[in-house]
Amino acid sequence: MSGPPASALYDVNVDGNLGPIAVWGGWVAFAVGVMFTFQMAPRDFPWALGLVLLTAASVEIGVRAFGDPLGTLIGAVVMTVVAFLLARSPRRPPAYVMYLGAFYVLTPGSHGLRGLESWIGGNKIQGVQGIADMLGLLTAIVIGILLGATAVRGSRETL
């Protein structure tokens, strides 16, 4: 047998070692960064932060229950429905203000970069898998947003 062993073709999974306080604190810091980057009005920040945290929790629960693509789809549906429903009140910020930070919770860009890095580094199987994962997550985000927007649009008569 020639060439590297099969185990060299795949990355090693590393368990997370940050506690929940650090993870959720990171989401809060991220939301503060979004607020400053996009010059969000301070009065709109609690709504945007709430949606970031809700989206992150929805994705986390969905991923643990069903895996990455379905968990991401669930997060996209929750994010879209909640943002559009909350925005119906004139006292709350527009949907896109609340939606902005939460959308970044879903982005799969690191999968694509990791796949490209693996491919260039010689792990072609892992590279293709990473790029395929990224495309699957992009599809889940698009379908989730469409499902959420459709659900909200269809519920106008009942609200």
Image (spheres, rainbow, N blue to C red):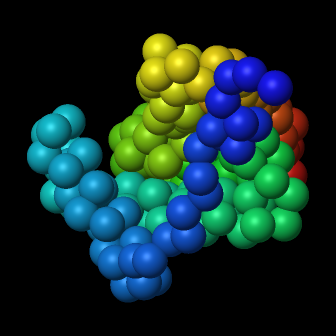
Position of residue 8 relative to residue 1, above or below, is below
Q: Residue at x 21, y 58 (%)?
A: 32
Side (left or right) of 55 relative to 142? left
Side (left or right) of 143 relative to 33? right
- Tell me where residue 64 appears, x and y as whole percent: 76, 66
Q: Residue at x 63, y 38 (%)?
A: 8
Task: Place residue 9 in its image quadrant.
Answer: top right
Task: Place residue 21 in its image quadrant.
Answer: bottom left
- Tell me where residue 92 appears, x and y as whole percent: 41, 55
- Tell me where residue 148 appears, x and y as whole percent: 76, 40
Q: Which quarter shows the N terminus?
A: top right
- Tell me where residue 52 appears, x and y as whole percent: 46, 58
Side (left or right) of 78 relative to 50? right
Q: Residue at x 19, y 50 (%)?
A: 33
Position of residue 150 relative to residue 157, above or below, is above
Along the viewing direction, whichever of 155 and 121 lies nearer the viewer: 121
Along the viewing direction, whichever of 49 and 17 lies nearer the viewer: 17
